[in-house]
Image (cartoon, rainbow, N blue to C red):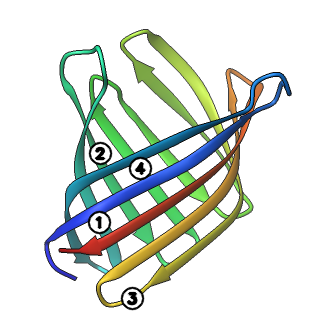
Amino acid sequence: MTKDVLISISGLHYSVDEENGAEPLEVITPASYYFKNGKHYVLYDEVVEGIPGTIKNTIKITGDRLFEINKSGIASTRMVFEKDRINMTNYQTPFGDMMVGIHTKDMRVDVQEENIDVHINYALDVNNEPLSECEIKVNIRGL
């Protein structure tokens, strides 16, 4: 795959209280890609509406069982998605810190020569309170 890629991240968050429907999310942005020591890395910047500054994101994909997102800047965290595992992380935001639990239920990774597709189903809790059921799809493709 080329160094210059386009990353598309789309997902749904279903609130645990049935009153709120699914909250869609979609981001498409240019990114940098490299492959090192058997791992795929994708780097991109994220702008948050209404807050000055950016979040630098690094995605690391290891095989078909481990997907990590490291965020630094105006928000900071290391989110780890491992199939059939629960991972806890401290999520630092401009509005305060939270302890986030990521319960990865299913993960599929498909790597092709110029395209990587990742699909993850997971549950999210914040400060040990169930928050939402989530689905995220990531597509990384060479330009």
Q: Earlier in the sequence, mark 3 or mark 2?
A: 2
Q: Quadrant of the N terminus?
A: bottom left
Q: Earlier in the sequence, mark 2 or mark 1?
A: 1
Q: Which amino acid does label 3 sit on?
A: Gln
Q: Where is residue 110 in the image (x, y as percent from the top left)?
A: 50, 81
Residue drawn at x 25%, y 63% as measured from the top left: 6
In-front residue for pair 55/63? 55
Q: Earlier in the sequence, mark 4 or mark 2?
A: 2
Q: What residue type is labelled 4?
A: Ile
Q: Position of residue 14 (x, y in %)?
A: 73, 37
State yes or no: discs 4 and 2 in contact (Cβ < 8 Å): yes
According to the image, label 3 marks what residue?
112
Q: Earlier in the sequence, mark 3 or mark 1?
A: 1
Looking at the rendered structure, the secondary structure element under dot 4 is strand
According to the image, label 2 marks what residue?
57
According to the image, label 1 marks what residue?
41
Q: Which amino acid does label 1 sit on?
A: Tyr
Q: Residue 139 carries which label?
A: none
Judged left or right of residue 109, residue 82 is right
